[in-house]
Image: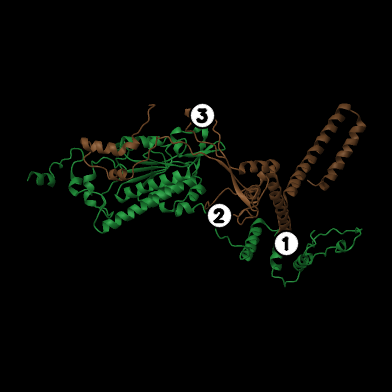
Amino acid sequence: MGKINLTALRVRKTALNQFASGKINKLPQWVDVVGEIPPSETLIRTPPPQHQLVRQRMKTVAGSSKPQVVFEVQENRRKSKKPSRLFQPLELKYEEDELRQDFFRDHPWELARPRVLLESTGKDHENYDWSRIKQPGKRLDGESVVQRQLWLLNNEPDMTKSNAYDIARREFYRLRLQEDIERRVAAEEAEATGANFGPSHLEIGMDLENQQYEKWKVWARTEAQLFEQRSAALSGAPEIALEQQSEKEETFTEQPDVPV
Amino acid sequence: MIVRKLCMRQSRQLLALNRRAPAYSRFLSTETPVETAVQTPAKESPAPAENPLHQVVQASRESRKLKPRQQWNELEKRRHKFNTLGSAVQESYDPEDILRNPPKPSDITLEMLLAAGTHMGHSTSRWNPQNSRYIFGIREGVHIISLDVTAAYLRRAAKVVEEVAARGGIILFAGTRKGQKRAVVHAAELAKGYHIFERWIPGSMTNGQQILGHCETKVVNALDEELPEFKVDLADRPSVKPDLVIVLNPLENVVLLHECGLNNVPTIGIIDTDADPTRVTYPIPANDDTLRGTSLIAGILGRAGEAGQKRRLEMAAEGKTDYEPITARQLRLDPLTGLPPPGSELEKGQQA
C-alpha cells in the first residue's frame, strides 16, 4: 500500500517472464499486440497547457488610412510559483467571460429562459456568423448578445466595449419585441381558425380559489349557528331563543338556493 | 391591436366565424368613442360550409362539452387533418442513434467527443494528480479533460481491441452503472465478446472453478463452428479467462481490475479525473458519468472489435490465421499435468 501499483502496465513483461520461467507453457495471444501497441507513459508529469487571453481589435494606426488588426496578449498569471504547484492545471479564461457576466448582471431574468444545452454534432458553431445577431437554428438569447458584442469588438474599427454592448443590446431588444408581436399574432390567428387554448393558469387558479371559498362559506355558516346557539343557551333569554329558532328555519328554507 | 394588415386578417376571421364586426370607428375617428361594445364571439355560429376549415372549427367548438375520450378523438382528427402543414424537421438528435449505430474508430472527431460531453472532469478538489497530463485546464472549478488526448487514447484502445479480436481473443465488456446496460450489451454483440452489466462477482477469475464451474464451454474451429467431439475433454478444464477486459466504470470495478492484475489480463478503462490511471493497462481519459459519452466509447470499441472479427473470419475462410491455433492433441492433454490422460488412445500412441 502507498506505492504505485504497476501490475496493469507490465502485463506483457509479466507474461514473458512467466513463459520464460515455465509457469505458462504458451504465450497469450495478446502479447505481440501489447508489444506493438504499448501502453502510454502514465505517470510522467508534463507541464500544463498555458492559456493566454488574446484580444483582437481593429485599430487605426497613425500613418495608415486603413484600420489594422491588433492582437493584445495577456499572460495567465500563476498564483503560486512553488515547485509543487508547477504541474497543476491552469484556469481557462476567455474574453467572452466578462461580457457574459456584464450582460447577465444587467438582465438576470434572461437566465430563467429555457435553453438548449444539447448538441447533436458539436459543429453548431460552423453555421453561425456573428456579423448579424440572428442565427439559423439558434434561439435568440443572452449568448447571442455576448457573441455579437465580441464580433463587433473584434471586427469593427475603434470599437469600445460599451459601444459594442449598446449596439448588440439594441438589436436584441428589437428582435425580442418582434418575437412578442409574432407570438400574439400567431395566437390570434390560431384562435380565429378554431384553436382552443383552454383556461389559462390564472383562470384555473381563480377556479380553485372559488371552490375553497365556497367550502369556507358552508363551514362558516355552521360555525356561526353553533356560536349563536351556545350564546343563547348561556343567556337563557327566551326571546333570543325564539328569534334564533325562526332564523334557523329561514336558513333551512334558504339552503337550496345557496350554491355549494 | 395592430392596424397593419387589419383587413386581411379580419376578413379571414369573418369567413371562419360569424361574429360581430369590430368597431372600425375607433380607427377612423379622432374623438374617443362614447360607447364601446364588448366583443364576444357568438356561441352558435351557422357559418357557411364553403370554408374547408369550417368543419374543424365546428368540431373544436363542440369539444368544450365533450368527454375526455371524445375530446381526444377530436384532437386526433384535427391533427390528422393538419399534419401535412407546417415545416418538416430535417435533422434532429436521436439519443438511440449512438446505441443502434455507433461510429467507427476512424470517425472519431473532437466535435463528436465534445457533443457527448467526454471533456468534463470532476471538481478540482477531487482530482487524482496522476491524471494531470490529461487535463487541459480548470473551468468553473471543474477540470476539463483534453479532447485531443481522449481521441488519441481512444484510437489506441480501439486498435488494441481490433487486434485482439483478430487473434481470436476473448473480450469482456463491463459497465455496471445504471443505464450502461444496453451500450455494453450492444458493444459485446458487435465485438462477439462477453458482457457484464450487473455486479462483478468477486473471485470469478481467481476462484473461477467454484463460481463459473457449472457454466457451459465449447470448442470452436477457426470459422466459429462448434466441434462437439471435444466436449468430453473440457470436463476438468479451469474456467476460461478473458484476453482483454474493457471497463466503463473502473471506480466501481476495482475488484475486477485487481483480479485482472493477478491473472495478468490487459485492461482498457475510462479514466475520469478522480480515477487511478495505473489500475488499467490502456486508460481512456474521459468523463465516465455521462451515459452518452460512455455509450459512444463503448460503441467505438465495439465497432473496432467488429472489424477485427471480420478480418479474422475472412482470413479463416482462406485457411489462414493471425494466431497460433490450438491442436487437437493439446486439447486432449490433461490440463494439470500436461500429459495424455491414462488409458486413452493418445497415451498408446506415445508409448508406441
* C-alpha distance separating marks 3 and 2: 39 Å
Disc 3: which residue? A81
| Colour convention | by chain
Task: Label 2, secondary structure: give it.
Answer: helix
Chain name for mark 3: A
3 or 2: mark nearer the eye: 3
Going from the N terminus, do you reach mark 2 or mark 1 first? 2
Pointers 2 and 1 in contact (CB under 8 A)?
no
Q: Are marks 3 and 1 in contact (CB under 8 Å)?
A: no
What mark, if any, has residue A189 been given in the picture? 1
Residue occupying the point 28% across, 54% down: B224
Give left or right: position of A69 versus B116: right
**Badge 2 sits on which subunit?**
A
Q: Residue B312: image x %, image y %? A: 30, 54
Drawn colour of chain A?
A: brown
Residue at x-position 60% and y-position 47%: A70
Closer to the observer: label 2 or label 1? 2
Q: Nearer the viewer, mark 3 or mark 1?
A: 3
- Residue B348 seen anywhere in this rendered image of the structure: yes
How much space separates mark 2 and mark 1, taking CA atoms?
Answer: 36 Å
Q: Residue at x 73, y 61 (%)?
A: A189
| Disc on the earlier residue, 3 or 2 | 3
Q: Which residue is mark 2?
A: A126
Determine the image quadrant of residue B7.
bottom right
Which chain is rendered green in the image?
B
Up the image or down, B219 lies above or below B69; here it is: above
